[in-house]
Image (tube, rainbow, N blue to C red):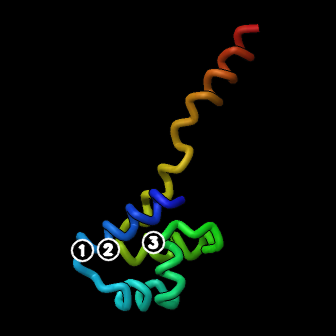
Amino acid sequence: MTELGVRIKLARLRRKLSSSVVAQRSGISRASLYKVEKGDAGATLGTYLRVLTALGLENDIQLLAADDKVGRKLQDLELKV
């Protein structure tokens, strides 16, 4: 989660957006944004998604668990039996 928070913060900084602007666009407080940028597990998934949307990265959520290599291998092994 910490790495995700760092990536989100870097995305904000690359866009030259202040924490106040991103928080406002996300409909959250700056304190909540700081939690997201620190990778705080107490921040809800919805909060992370709101921040990603404010940064124009909402489609990145589709990449989570998209390539389930272990699951596919297990499925293939089961099919071969």
Front residue of 52/16: it is: 16
Mark 3, secondary structure of its residue: helix
Mark 2, secondary structure of its residue: helix
Q: Which residue is mark 3?
A: 37
| Circles 1 and 3: CB atoms closer than 8 Å | no
Amino acid at pointer 1 = Arg
Nearer the camera: disc 1 or disc 3: 3
Mark 1, secondary structure of its residue: loop
Q: In screen coordinates, is 73 left or right of 5?
A: right
Front residue of 35/29: it is: 35
Residue at point 48% right, 81% down? 33
Q: Which residue is mark 2?
A: 12
Q: Earlier in the sequence, mark 2 or mark 3?
A: 2
Residue at point 38% right, 84% down? 22
Near mark 2 (Cα within 10 A), the count class, few <14, some 14-19 or many ≥20, is many
Residue 2 is situated, as x and y percent measured from the top left of the image, at 50, 60
Front residue of 1/62: it is: 1
Q: Earlier in the sequence, mark 1 or mark 3?
A: 1
**Relative to residue 75, is residue 31 depicted above or below?**
below
Residue at point 52% right, 71% down? 48
Amino acid at pointer 2 = Arg
Near mark 1 (Cα within 10 A), the count class, few <14, some 14-19 or many ≥20, is few
Image quadrant in which the C terminus is located? top right
Q: Quadrant of residue 74?
A: top right
Amino acid at pointer 3 = Glu
Residue 3 is situated, as x and y percent measured from the top left of the image, at 45, 57
Q: Which residue is mark 1?
A: 15
| Circles 2 and 3: CB atoms closer than 8 Å | yes
Nearer the camera: disc 2 or disc 3: 3
| Circles 1 and 2: CB atoms closer than 8 Å | yes
Image quadrant in which the N terminus is located? bottom right
